[in-house]
């Protein structure tokens, strides 16, 4: 029977040619192949007849090999790498099948033997390290034989499925943009820090090996002799610069009790210990509080820790010592870490100022107002800032505790996500999912969320926490078993509802719950304080200290009738002062405030509303240029383009002492406003700011009515000052004939962060959480 041998010449250097291939060459009478491959094996040739052809003549080469083999010659067909991978073996079989359909049955049969070689992907992987230790996909970018649309489909599928992706034929003289498009597709599913190996002329003369990242790969030389290997979510670069994709053996090592395994302690399926991310099935499930609790838990064990939330949408903000603006929750989490808040902890803050737009604050500074489409276009730049901030924190702290935003299963937002799993991929960290049982349907929350994730996103999930439970947790056992069996993700514990933590809330949705609270009076007098529930209310956490006073009843006012019976009305901050003024007019609250006889307090935007006019000539907040204020204070405000953000120290001025008699303490607070307020009559300032950040200043702040009944100020955090709060409320208590609260009666509060950390430690599997985080599992 006639025979044809097809060999793979390996990477191209004869040192890597297999013994079987060498023997096939030696025993052949005719050698056929691409001229470059023939030159590579020429030192092994003796008296064989050689037929070499140029590129693009693959069919002719295979036809010659089949014909000569059938004529009785011992033919060896040379293929690059491995003949069965983008090689000549498949083409030979195709041609033989075509011949079989057209030839007479008496045509001589041909025996074909394929001798494997070392493929280009194996050679490239060997010089990079171990990038192909887990599932991988091999895709050629050459569209000569495969339609480009089909190549795109395959790239998208491989990217989403978290395969390591090996790219053949990445670029040629005529194909320049394909590798650029392939990178764009990969970036849609993977962070720019994903390791990438670029190998040219692997295992042969002229070899070049580069380990870079997905974001930087196009800065390096790539040609037809190059192979590109793009890592998956677990790939990392070790200390020797080798690219490694873990197979998952680290999990076995961690559960083994054999001493020999100790050398691998700390190895992780993800790159390295250093971060964890708490994500949610929805908003207000408790992510912020759990993040703070885990921060404190690690701090108590000697780790240097920082919080991080890449993008926060909130009107509750805080000013850092350097004068930047971040979400209030991240300032609270920094407190849990026992460090000063920094803008890198919340690099992107969105402050909604309409139903379709927000002011965008990046690394502490407002960059403008954007609608949804404008912000989507801005997101690539925003994500660069997110990455910068995370990298700086990672350099400064041992461990970063990250918080996601809203739900991780918002499939309509996935493509442009810079708040959840794309950030976890960037950080190369595990994710713990938080679900809220208090709102009902917790098992559906968990299953539905995980089912909507892409495979590479599911791979990041390492644990589930069920939060806000009331009752006996044993009744959840069957449901938890079902969750773990269905998803393969362990439930780390059930956190019972923890009342009286006194931590600031993140989302204004909690105001709806507070408004529904009914206070049952026991016959003793109470101070009834109403807070206007403005559509664009901001920094409502200013009033949390009032909520903790045992003789104060807080309610949120939405209609005029709710002013009846109040001793005091507070107008809070607003992201859109003019729009919220018109809201008060439309609801009839505007006129009701004018008739209100109790005390009135305005904070920030509320202070602006108390004045005679609010002007917005540059349309900073809205299309409206002017609104008539409540006219209760003789001031006028103009909204400016630049925002004032400062931590501030102040003393009460003479008229401020009418508000809080005998309060001579230094007041601490912070300013966040885009307006300047001018006195229209002889000024009656509330306070004198003497320090902004590190700068000494002399600035009159706020205004007090002549009778001391009404005052406004730009100082957020005013009621956090204990002595001011005591003397201010005592003045109101005295007017109502209530017992005064003296400073001696103020009991030192327990540390809520310690209480939260202890609560989590009691109810969660902290040993497993530490293992997930790559921090070992030995609890002190």
Image (cartoon, rainbow, N blue to C red):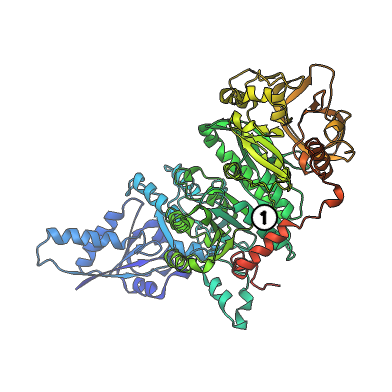
Q: Front-most of 301 and 392?
A: 301
Residue displayed at 37% across by 48% down: 153
Name the residue that disc number 1 marks.
292
Give the percent coordinates (x, y) of residue 224.
45, 51
Residue displayed at 75% across by 57% down: 751
Q: Quadrant of the N terminus?
A: bottom left
Quarter of the figure with residue 591? top right
Instruction: State left or right for residue 375 relative to residue 683.
Output: left
Q: Front-most of 274 and 291?
A: 291
Quarter of the figure with residue 297? bottom right
Give the percent coordinates (x, y) of residue 529.
70, 37
Relative to 92, say whether 516 is above or below: above
Instruction: State left or right for residue 427 relative to residue 652.
Output: left
Instruction: Tell me, yes or no, if residue 60 can be seen here.
Output: yes
Instruction: State left or right for residue 98 relative to residue 54.
Output: left
Quarter of the figure with residue 561? top right
Relative to 58, say whether 386 is above or below: above
Q: Front-most of 84 and 305?
A: 305
Instruction: Tell me, yes or no, if residue 162 can be seen here.
Output: no
Relative to 521, say whether 771 is above or below: below
Give the percent coordinates (x, y) of residue 383.
59, 43
Toward the front, the furthest residue is: 523
How packed mark 1 is, by other alpha carbons closer than 10 Å (few <14, some 14-19, many 20 or more), is: many
User: Helix, strand, or loop for circle 1?
Assistant: helix
Q: Quadrant of the C terminus?
A: bottom right
Q: Front-most of 259 and 756?
A: 756
Give the percent coordinates (x, y) of residue 749.
78, 55
């Amino acid at each position: 029977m006639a025979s044809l041998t097809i060999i793979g010449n390996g990477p191209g250097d004869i040192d890597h040619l297999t013994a079987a291939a060498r023997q096939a060459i030696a025993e052949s009478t005719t050698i056929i192949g691409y001229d470059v491959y023939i030159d590579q094996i020429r030192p092994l040739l003796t008296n064989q007849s050689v037929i070499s052809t140029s590129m693009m003549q693959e069919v002719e080469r295979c036809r010659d090999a089949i014909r000569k083999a059938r004529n009785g010659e011992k033919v060896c067909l040379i293929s690059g790498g491995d003949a069965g991978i983008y090689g000549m073996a498949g083409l030979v079989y195709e041609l033989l099948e075509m011949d079989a359909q057209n030839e007479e049955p008496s045509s001589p049969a041909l025996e074909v033997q394929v001798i494997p070689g070392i493929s280009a992907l194996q050679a490239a992987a060997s010089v990079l390290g171990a990038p192909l230790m887990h599932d991988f996909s091999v895709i050629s970018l050459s569209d000569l034989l495969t339609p480009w649309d089909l190549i795109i489909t395959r790239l998208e599928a491989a990217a989403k499925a978290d395969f390591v992706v090996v790219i053949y034929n990445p670029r040629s003289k005529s194909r320049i943009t394909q590798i650029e498009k392939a990178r764009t597709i990969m970036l849609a599913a993977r962070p720019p820090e994903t390791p990438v190996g670029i190998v040219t002329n692997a295992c042969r003369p002229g070899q070049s090996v580069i380990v870079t990242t997905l974001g930087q790969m196009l800065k390096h030389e790539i040609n037809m002799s190059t192979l590109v290997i793009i890592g998956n979510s677990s790939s990392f670069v070790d200390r020797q610069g080798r690219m490694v994709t873990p197979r998952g053996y680290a999990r076995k090592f961690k559960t083994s009790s054999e001493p020999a395994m100790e050398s691998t302690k700390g190895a992780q399926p993800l790159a390295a210990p250093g971060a964890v991310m708490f994500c949610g099935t929805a908003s207000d499930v408790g992510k912020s509080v759990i993040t703070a609790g885990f921060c404190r838990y690690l701090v108590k064990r000697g780790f240097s820790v920082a919080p991080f939330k890449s993008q926060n949408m909130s009107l509750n903000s805080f000013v850092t010592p350097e004068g930047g603006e971040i979400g209030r929750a991240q300032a609270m989490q920094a407190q849990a870490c026992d460090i000063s808040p920094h803008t890198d902890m919340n690099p992107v803050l969105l402050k909604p100022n309409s139903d379709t737009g927000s002011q965008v604050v990046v690394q502490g500074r407002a960059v403008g107002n954007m609608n949804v489409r404008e912000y989507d276009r801005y997101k690539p730049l925003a994500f660069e800032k997110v990455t910068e901030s995370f990298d700086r924190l990672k350099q400064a702290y041992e461990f970063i505790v990250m918080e996601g935003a809203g739900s991780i299963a918002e499939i309509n937002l996935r493509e442009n996500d810079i708040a959840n799993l794309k950030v976890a991929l960037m950080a190369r960290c595990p994710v713990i999912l938080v679900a809220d049982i208090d709102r009902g349907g917790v098992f559906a929350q968990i299953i539905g969320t995980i089912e909507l994730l892409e495979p590479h996103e599911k791979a990041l999930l390492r644990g589930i926490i069920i939060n806000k439970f009331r009752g006996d947790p044993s009744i959840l056992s069957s449901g938890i078993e079902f969750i773990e069996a269905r998803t393969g993700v362990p439930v780390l514990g059930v956190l019972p509802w923890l009342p009286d933590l006194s931590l600031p809330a993140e989302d204004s949705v909690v105001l709806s719950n507070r408004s529904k609270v009914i206070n049952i009076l026991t016959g003793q007098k109470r101070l009834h304080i109403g807070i206007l529930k403005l559509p664009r209310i901001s920094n409502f956490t200013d009033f949390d200290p009032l909520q903790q006073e045992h003789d104060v009843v807080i309610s949120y006012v939405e209609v005029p009738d709710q002013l009846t019976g109040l001793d005091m009305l507070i107008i809070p901050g607003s992201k859109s002062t003019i729009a919220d003024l018109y809201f008060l007019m439309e609801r009839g609250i505007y006129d009701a405030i004018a008739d209100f006889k109790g005390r009135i307090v305005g904070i920030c935007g509320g202070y602006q509303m108390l004045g005679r006019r609010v002007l917005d000539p540059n349309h900073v907040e809205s299309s409206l240029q002017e609104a008539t204020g409540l006219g209760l204070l003789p001031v006028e405000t103009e909204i400016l383009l630049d925002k004032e953000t400062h931590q501030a120290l102040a003393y009460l001025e003479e008229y401020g002492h009418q508000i809080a008699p005998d309060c001579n303490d230094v007041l601490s607070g912070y300013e966040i406003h885009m307006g300047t307020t001018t006195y229209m009559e002889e000024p009656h300032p509330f306070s004198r700011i003497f320090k902004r950040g590190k700068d000494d200043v002399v600035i009159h702040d706020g205004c007090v009515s002549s009778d001391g009944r009404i005052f406004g100020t730009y100082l957020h955090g005013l009621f956090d000052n204990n002595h001011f709060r005591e003397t201010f409320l005592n003045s109101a208590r005295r007017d109502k004939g209530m017992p005064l609260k003296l400073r001696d009666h103020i009991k030192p509060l327990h540390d809520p962060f310690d209480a939260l950390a202890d609560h989590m430690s009691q109810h969660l599997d902290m040993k497993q959480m530490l293992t997930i985080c790559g921090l070992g599992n030995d609890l002190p």
